[in-house]
Amino acid sequence: MKHHVTTTVNGDEVEFLCETEQTLLDCLRDELELTGTKEGCGSGDCGACSVLLDGRLVCSCLVLGVETNGKKIETIEGMATGDKLHPLQRKFLEHAALQCGICTPGVLVAAKSLLEKNPNPTETEVRYWLAGNLCRCTGYDKIIRAVMDAAAEMRGA
Amino acid sequence: MQERVKSPKFDVVGTRPVRPDGADKVTGRAKYGADHNVAGQLVGKVLRSPHPHARIKSIDTSAALAMTGVKAVVTRDDFKDQSSEFVPAGEMLVNYRDVVRNVMAREKVLFEGHPVAAVAATSESVARAALRAIKVEYEILPHVIDVVEAMKPDAPIVEDGMITVGVTPPPTKPSNVAKRVEFVLGDIEKGFKEADLVIEREFNTKPVHQGYIEPHACVASVSEDGTAELWTTTQGHWIARAHCARLLGWDMTKLRVTSSEIGGGFGGKTVVYLEPLALALSAKTHRPVKMAMTREEVFKASGPTSGANVWVKMGVKKDGTITAGEAVLKYQAGCFQGSPVQPGCMCAFAPYDLANVKVVGFDVLSNRPKVAAYRAPGGPISEYAVESVVDEIAEKLGMCPIELRLKNAAKEGTKAAYGPKFGPVGMVECLEAAKGSPHWKAPLGKNQGRGIAAGFWFNIGGETTVNLQLNEDGTLTLMAGTPDIGGLRASLAMMAAEELKIPYEKVRPIIADTSSLGYNFVTGGSRSTFSSGLATVEAARSIIKQACGRAAKLWEIPEDAVTWESGEIKPAGDNAGKFKPMTLTDIAKVAGKTGGSIVGVGAISAQGAAPSFGVHIADSEVDPDTGKLTITRYTVIQDAGIAIHPAYVEGQYQGGAAQGIGWALNEEYIYGDDGKLQNAGFLDYRIPVASDLPMIETIIVEVPNPRHPYGVRGIGETAIVPPMAAINASAARATGVRMFELPLSPPKVLKAMKAAKKA
Amino acid sequence: MRYESPDTLEAAAKLLASESGEARILAGGTDLLVQIRAEVLSPALVVDIKKVAETRAIKEEAGGFRIGAAVTGAELKEHSALKKVWPGLVEAANLIGSTQVQGRASLGGNLCNGSPAADSVPAMIAAGAIASIVGPNGRRDLKVEDIMLAPRKLALQKGEIIASFLLPKRAPHSGDAYLRFIPRTEMDIAVVGCGVSLTLDGSGTCTAARVGLGAVAARPLLVEDAAKALVGTKVDDAALEKMAAAARAACKPIDDKRGTIEFRTDVAGVLAKRTALIALERARKA
């Protein structure tokens, strides 16, 4: 029997049905058609599926869909406001901080969570916070610069 | 920090605009392989061999087929056998006899993870249950994993009856050596006689995976009339179409392949794995079938690159002149022939102007997944070995490693051992830039060492089509067919804008499907910016010519009395000044009345690809108590020809370096005695994470390629060639010990340091 | 696979005890969900214990701290009072996986996953943590070092759940630390892990010490000889060398994809010294 789950996703109340085995990632992608959250490994080792669950950064592949009943979920699809990109999104484009872009949604969600907790991180803090977000294209250099630059802009704003 | 060595003046080329596909990629809107769904789709899953080597005695699918929700099963019986025939695909040749067996095992399973059957079912859980219900009877055979072991006379034979090609007289006994290749220049014996110092070393490397974050995924939908749609994450959808059509016996025109956004490939997505299975399952059910690999499947059953054993011998005079270079390369191919040993041989001594070279290569089968191209396939392995010896020569001669390389560097006119004479190349410029870099002069701390190494990659051109259409409002839509793996659309739009003297934002580039555009060879060989760039320029010039023709028609003057000047169409000669110049937008508005739509097509086989040389500087620090190496500073210096979009050029340099750092320090395929892969996941297959790396400094050297209108050289691959040797050299200085094996993982380094201390 | 999320331990224990098939407790799920997906485990029942208040709370108790078994690493890190007294334990919990994993992974899960390489376990052993276990027959206490017996094998009966851990009251001038060796800087499983907790007297002499080692044997170890090497000393070089030797002597590691016997044994000594020095520094300041 499937579970009936009611959650808030990016501010909207949504309902879905899921099997116990389905992870939050499966539910987002397959039940809610929010495919911005990516699956790179399914084992919590790559961070491509990063989302916020009640404000806490998690791998959605390591959460069961049924566990999210009554909880608040934020995904990459909710990051921009109207036609305004989040400063992190804009800085990623300006710094060419993505190549293939598959890791980008997860990195952005993770970086946003960092800056909410620590608006002025050092390079080392950014690197360790994002250590669970694998990127195979960029060597991380431009990602780190984009996050630092976005942080600086957000502090100034 | 980011330095440009030399740059001509362009309006758009050389700037850093936001990529056209950028907003979609930072908002989650971009659709990758697994992001596409079709109403009514089934889930496809693959049953894979648990054994590294076994004969398939029988496959019983009846129980699976009887399950509720299981719609189809395919096995070897659903694919016609193919005769042995080598065709180009990606940067390597493929043999359809092997492709059909790689996609689905026939007589034998040849590696752990080899597909044996595939099912289509109404859900993931039903599909998984169906796999468990398929009964396969195996006769287990002895297996061989290591390349040196596989070459021994008593090794288990992977491909029954295989006789080595390239040996005279041909061997009478089958072996795992598919091919022997040899490249000779000058007289190697004479070269060694002239040497004052000869160094001879043997190196070993492990297979490493491309490690793209996006697993292989596709959706196939076959209609009742036999036409089919395939959505897949690939570096080459025309190649995917060709392979699938061949394996399924279909006309190409019936199969329309759309390349999704691609989440990394690095060579590994030039191969079909799931696509023929999904199509076959869809053809049986006439339902769309979606398939995606798990990460474990990616590691176990998609292409890593070769592990290898490499022997290098080099002779040098006291003044640093290298008199001879000799190497023997043994590359592991996986379970079918076709390792990149040939390009490995060709690259080995390519950075140097040598009179006497001999390189012999062996392509060797073992019970591992068939290797796939990985960024400069073959080059990183042979050049790691050669550059490590070059570094040791510098040390023994007491010479600066840059000076030693400068003395022997390949330059315009150098005849490479593999045949051609180089045109203008940037090896010397890169070395000079390295010498002048702040990094090279910076002091080192305790337990730190600095290494430097050079690298080379050929780069290719090939068949390419670009379609550029002038829209009614004067904007342009650009259709390219080389999948955009990291900024291509930006570079093509920039070249079109430069050529047409219009704003970059007025060109909207897309990647077209196989039914919408002429043939395109893969994104690979660092060819896409070069080749699709050439085709873009050709298409743009065609637009200009047509626009001039339209103006001539309007003005009622001969076509040759119209010129194109700084983005304007003007009457020339006797008619100069007689008519108001027109822009492309003006022409676009009247296109309908002057002959119809204006479309420029560049359909070419791109010639004139030029090699890119690079030099990397690495600093590493060793923890003397644990043997752990940390990269503390890193600089990439590489010739880009001309950097169209410098930020994406830097990105390629940085990404190549990071992959090389992983290859050097921790990445490896680890097998148990049972022939099974033990680290098929990102937890234990250790690619670098953000906290492992320093900022990666870049210096873009620009020695323009004379055979490209914007001087472009391919740049994507060279960047992975030098890191292993640069890091090996830095580790030698940091630890005081020379090591000859990758990866330089802590247990190995600590052991080597302890052994050196004892000695 | 059934999913239940009772709000009392008694109800959870009853569900687990009465399940005839395989039953698993879900806390953070960072190991469990991976194993289910890989089909290593196919439980018939998953009991989510996060709705039980005790499992999710950090409370001061008897001068020490009671930490719910399902409290996440990230929550431990944000608890400043706990972090001040037990920085080593909090650091250990925050070495488990990524930032994302720390948002879910718990001390209870890290222990009950039954891996000899679990990062928080040597730190809990060093801290002298005591697990409070609720089962069908009521509640009992067990020292953390006595819980894991062998890989994937625990000293828990069917239906028993670790509800919380008690960290004892700290004496003045005490400090703890945890270090692990991994080939990268993050995202790896410990090749060796070492937790040290020690207490000094007013003169700086070590009066009590506990040393936990991970990934060097079939289970995490309490290494009493290593602790003895420190007690009664000023934790000087000679004592540290002796301690390192004792740590090495306690190792019974295996050769595997993550390290060799020789390497693990070597590094256990290196880490023991380094960890003790950090704990010492903290004790001096405490």
Image: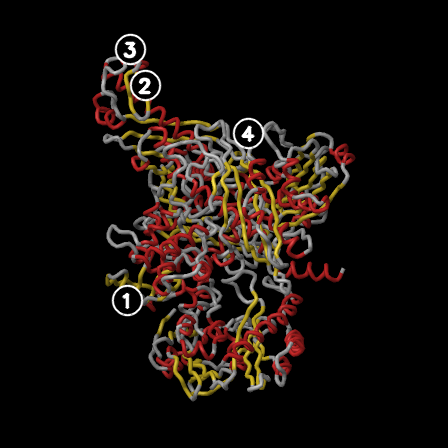
Precedes in sequence: disc 2 or disc 3: 2
Report the chain holding disc 2.
B
| Secondary structure of the residue carrying numbered label 3 | helix
Point out which mark residue B424 bears. Answer: 4
What is the spatial separation of the Cα atoms under label 1 and label 4, in whole angstroms? 67 Å
- Disc 2/disc 3 C-alpha distance (Å): 12 Å
Determine which of the numbered discs, if any, sits on residue A4 in the image.
Answer: 1
Is residue B603 visible in the rendered image? The answer is: yes
Mark 3 belongs to which subunit? B
Q: Is residue B226 visible?
A: no
Between the C-alphas of marks 1 and 3, the distance is 80 Å
Tag 2 residue: B563
**Category of crowding for the residue at label 4, using alpha-carbon neighbours closer than 10 angstroms: few (below 14), some (14–19), many (at least 20):** some
The quarter in which the C terminus of chain B is drawn is bottom right
The label nearer to you, 1 versus 4, is 4
**Along the line of sight, which residue is nearer the eye, B251 or B165?**
B165
* Residue at which label 3 appears: B574
Q: Nearer the viewer, residue C221 or C128?
A: C128
Q: Are marks 3 and 4 in contact (CB under 8 Å)?
A: no
Q: Quadrant of residue B578?
A: top left
Q: Can you tell which of label 3 and label 4 is closer to the viewer?
A: 3
Three-letter residue code for mark 1: His
Residue type marked 2 = Thr
Mark 4 residue type: Pro
**Labelled pair 2, 1 in contact (Cβ < 8 Å):** no
Q: Is residue A39 left or right of residue B705?
A: left
